[in-house]
Image (cartoon, grey):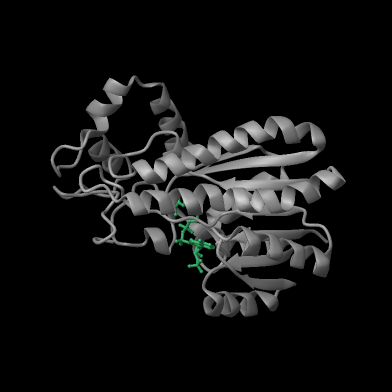
Amino acid sequence: MKTAIVTGAAGGLGLELCRALVLRGYRVAMFSRDAAQLEIEATTLRAKGQVIALPGDVTDTARVREAVEHVEATWGPIDLAIANAGIRNATWAEDFPLGWAKRLMETNYFGMLHLFDAVIPRMLDRNQGCFVGIASLAGIRCLPGGSGYGASKAAMQAFLDTVRLELGPRGIQVVTINPWFIRTPAKDDGVPRPMMVEVDWAANTIVSGIEAGKKQIEFPLLPSLGWKLLRLFPNSAFAWLFGHRHGRSSIGLKILMLAGKLGRPSSNHRLFRRSDES
Ligand SMILES: NC(=O)c1ccc[n+]([C@@H]2O[C@H](COP(=O)([O-])OP(=O)(O)OC[C@H]3O[C@@H](n4cnc5c(N)ncnc54)[C@H](OP(=O)(O)O)[C@@H]3O)[C@@H](O)[C@H]2O)c1
């Protein structure tokens, strides 16, 4: 039986990943800050398999190390570690929220590094294991308001794509996940998002991809192909498409909404809202 640890497991994609893993026969350690919620979700999942709830914050290096030690002492080697915990806040250039920009990096990027630091030496000792980071297509190109989020996800991608070169030959699978929009509590705010996928579909797509040995998983197909194509666009063309027009929706957003057949965005529609608006 394989053992997995998932951060950000109290809700959203992290919880669905835990559910998908338990249903596939993994022992799952769930790591998240909200101890009460985590225990409720772990209790439900225990009806289906072996689950440990580990309250903690991914920004706390010592706590992440402690959690990994606890899992290995209880169940033995961790086969799969998924750095999923993440936050998403707007960082508009006007009235720039430096504190949020730092928190985004500390949670999304350094939070992943804390898990990496705790599990990789153990995986290297055994020359086996799998490390997964839930990044985002926003790390490839990000829309106005998402500079801090996009930067944290781009950092994750650069890190994972580089360590893969070092760890692959040592028998360790490193996987970058770049999802488009997934319907989770973080995204269930009434803002229309084109081609949004359901969270259980996303979790199963991710786990199936990991088990198939993939190193990069992007979904759904159309937005991920389109978004990667945008990387090839000159910055001037990207700015023409998605430039922020004094609160008015950009041409690119209108095209996205039409493509998703979800109606026209309102005149002040923003995918990234200020934290006081969310
Ligand atoms: N939803 C999307 O459309 C989408 C698209 C692309 C990428 N992603 C990425 O997918 C991941 C999950 O997103 P989601 O939509 O499921 O978000 P979510 O619904 O907000 O869930 C995030 C989870 O992370 C936990 N968390 C947040 N900060 C933490 C911290 N410092 N330490 C430990 N746990 C923490 C939260 O629980 P606690 O409060 O209990 O800690 C929560 O369970 C994120 O990395 C996100 O960037 C999401």
Question: For residue 215, which quarter of the picture?
Answer: top right
Q: Where is residue 270 in the image (x, y as percent from the top left)?
A: 24, 49
Residue at (58% x, 50% y) in the render:
112
Give the tally of numbered discs: 0
Asked whether the viewer can see residue 87, the reply is yes
Q: Quadrant of residue 253?
A: top left
- Residue 196: tell me if it is visible: no
46 vs 59: above or below: below
Instruction: Give how far across and how far down residue 9 sits, in percent.
Output: 57, 65
Residue sitting nearer the eye, 95 or 78 = 95
Quadrant of the frame with the N terminus: bottom right
Residue 236 position (above or below residue 226): above
**Which one is in front, 82 or 216?**
82
- Residue appearing at x 25%, y 42% in the figure: 93
Q: Which of 14 and 85 is in front in this view?
A: 85
Camera-nearest residue between 230 and 275: 275
158 vs 97, left or right, is: right
**Which residue occupies the extreme right position in the image?**
126
Where is residue 240? Give x, y as percent.
23, 26
Quadrant location, the C terminus: bottom left
Residue 165 lies, in percent from the top left, at: 70, 29
